[in-house]
């Protein structure tokens, strides 16, 4: 087959996406494949079977990251080109998030092998452990450990929401590995956008040039519980009202930001949580994101100042996660754009609003991402959807980039 006509097997890719999307359905039909669960084992087993079917060697490291490698004897000493993402899901998930990048990476390697091309360096597709962070914290744990951001022992000691340890659960499902994989020469991750920009603008391919910094905090505000009917407004120490004021402050500040700041309070609880009692305590989480580190720090400081100025309220703050913004490798971003245009696709440079394994790999290797549209910008939801034509287009762009970077 002429290189100019090379394309992935679209039927195989789409079929595998659907098959993987059926693994982990609960009694209500929801897709729930949490890290190191029985459902995750079933999904991992299926991916490993497909990788071996393609003639790839499979390695598993100590945190359960799976690596499917295509290595020829003459290039075994070279640093690999790595593709990938994750196959664990949130609760009641769609079928594309993470899985598309892993299965498209596998499809790209299979396509190149079947075309009898010879890579100048090893190619590897990775399925990283616990990207979603639903059962174990932090999220993006497998790629973070691979990149040296936390130690393997720290990752294995993570305790899940069910009280179980990651290390013990990986051993239970048969994915407590011991293999080492070389640091990649580069990393490319194909992913659905999970946002509305590409669809809204009618653009086929996103060449992701940067990724927002993320600041997660848990705030606890302590007031005084009292009778809702007999306590004058001026004499209250209302932890519920204080929480509302903090939320409003954050929302208005983010709306006024010129750097693309977003702020979310995704969880909140009042105590004693009674209709006729002034809340004595409010506990809520804050998710702040910004593509500019200086701006993100400014918002964090403004929040701290606002909390410190609350009257009659005791404040405590717990830092849950903090990742700086990531600038992806501009050479790779240009290559993605060129490959998209060569296929006749419209392309847009853009920022990722979500966290991805690519941001961890960017610590140790040149990295970049390719986005395809998400209908309605919906993700982490069973309504998550990307048309087949867009999935195929993204996989072929990935194929062309990999071919350019790795094939003689």
Image: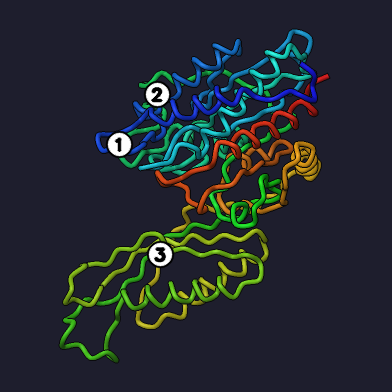
Label of residue 41 in the image: 2
Mark earlier in primary sequence (2, 3)? 2
Q: Could you classify mark 3 by the number of other residues whose Cα lies within 10 Å: few (under 14), some (14-19), or many (20 or more)?
A: many
When asked about the image quadrant of residue 341, the answer is: top right
Residue mark closest to the camera, 1 vs 3: 1
Quadrant showing the C terminus: top right
What numbered label is drawn on residue 29? 1
Asked which quadrant contains residue 100, the reply is: top right
Real-space Cα distance between discs 1 and 2?
18 Å
Tell me where residue 280 sits by quadrant.
Answer: bottom left
* Residue identifier under label 3: 219
- Local secondary structure at mark 2: helix
Left or right of 72 in this view: 247: left
Question: Residue 257, how many percent across, how many down?
Answer: 62, 72
Residue at 40% x, 24% y is 41
Q: Secondary structure at mark 3?
A: strand
The crowding category of the residue bearing disc 2, from other C-alpha atoms within 10 Å (few below 14, some 14 to 19, many at least 20), is many
Q: What percent of the width, then of the height, locates residue 121? A: 76, 19
């Amino acid at each position: 087959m002429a290189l100019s006509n090379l394309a992935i097997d679209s039927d195989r890719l789409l079929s595998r996406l659907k098959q993987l999307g059926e693994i982990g359905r609960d009694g209500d039909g929801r897709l729930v494949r949490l890290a190191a669960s029985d459902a995750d084992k079933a999904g991992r087993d299926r991916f490993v079977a497909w990788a071996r079917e393609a003639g790839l060697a499979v390695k598993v490291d100590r945190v359960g990251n799976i690596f499917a490698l295509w290595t020829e004897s003459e290039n075994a000493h070279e640093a690999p080109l790595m593709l990938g993402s994750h196959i664990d899901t949130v609760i009641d998930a769609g079928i594309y998030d993470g899985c598309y990048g892993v299965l498209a990476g596998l499809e790209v390697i299979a396509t190149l092998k079947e075309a009898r091309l010879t890579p100048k360096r090893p190619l590897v597709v990775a399925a990283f452990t616990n990207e979603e962070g639903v059962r174990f914290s932090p999220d993006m744990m497998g790629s973070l450990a691979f990149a040296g951001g936390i130690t393997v022992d720290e990752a294995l000691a993570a305790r899940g929401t069910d009280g179980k340890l990651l290390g013990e659960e990986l051993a239970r499902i048969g994915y407590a590995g011991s293999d080492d994989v070389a640091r990649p020469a580069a990393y490319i991750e194909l992913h659905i956008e999970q946002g509305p920009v590409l669809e809204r603008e009618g653009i086929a391919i996103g060449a992701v040039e940067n990724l927002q910094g993320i600041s997660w905090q848990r705030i606890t505000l302590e007031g005084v519980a009292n009778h809702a009917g007999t306590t004058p407004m001026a004499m209250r120490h209302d932890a519920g009202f204080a929480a509302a004021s903090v939320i409003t402050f954050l929302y208005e500040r983010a709306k006024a930001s010129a750097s693309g700041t977003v702020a979310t309070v995704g969880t909140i609880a009042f105590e004693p949580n009674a209709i006729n009692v002034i809340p004595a305590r409010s506990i809520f989480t804050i998710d702040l994101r910004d593509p500019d580190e200086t701006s993100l720090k400014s918002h964090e400081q403004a929040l701290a100042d606002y909390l410190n100025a609350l009257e009659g309220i005791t404040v405590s703050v717990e830092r849950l996660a903090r990742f700086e913004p990531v600038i992806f490798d501009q050479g790779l971003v240009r290559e993605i754009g060129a490959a998209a245009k060569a296929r006749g696709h419209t392309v847009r440079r853009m920022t990722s609003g979500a966290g991805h394994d690519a941001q961890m790999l960017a610590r140790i290797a040149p990295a970049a991402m390719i986005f395809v549209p998400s209908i309605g910008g919906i993700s982490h939801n069973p309504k998550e959807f990307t048309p087949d034509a867009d999935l195929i287009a993204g996989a072929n762009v990935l194929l062309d980039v990999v071919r350019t970077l790795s094939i003689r």
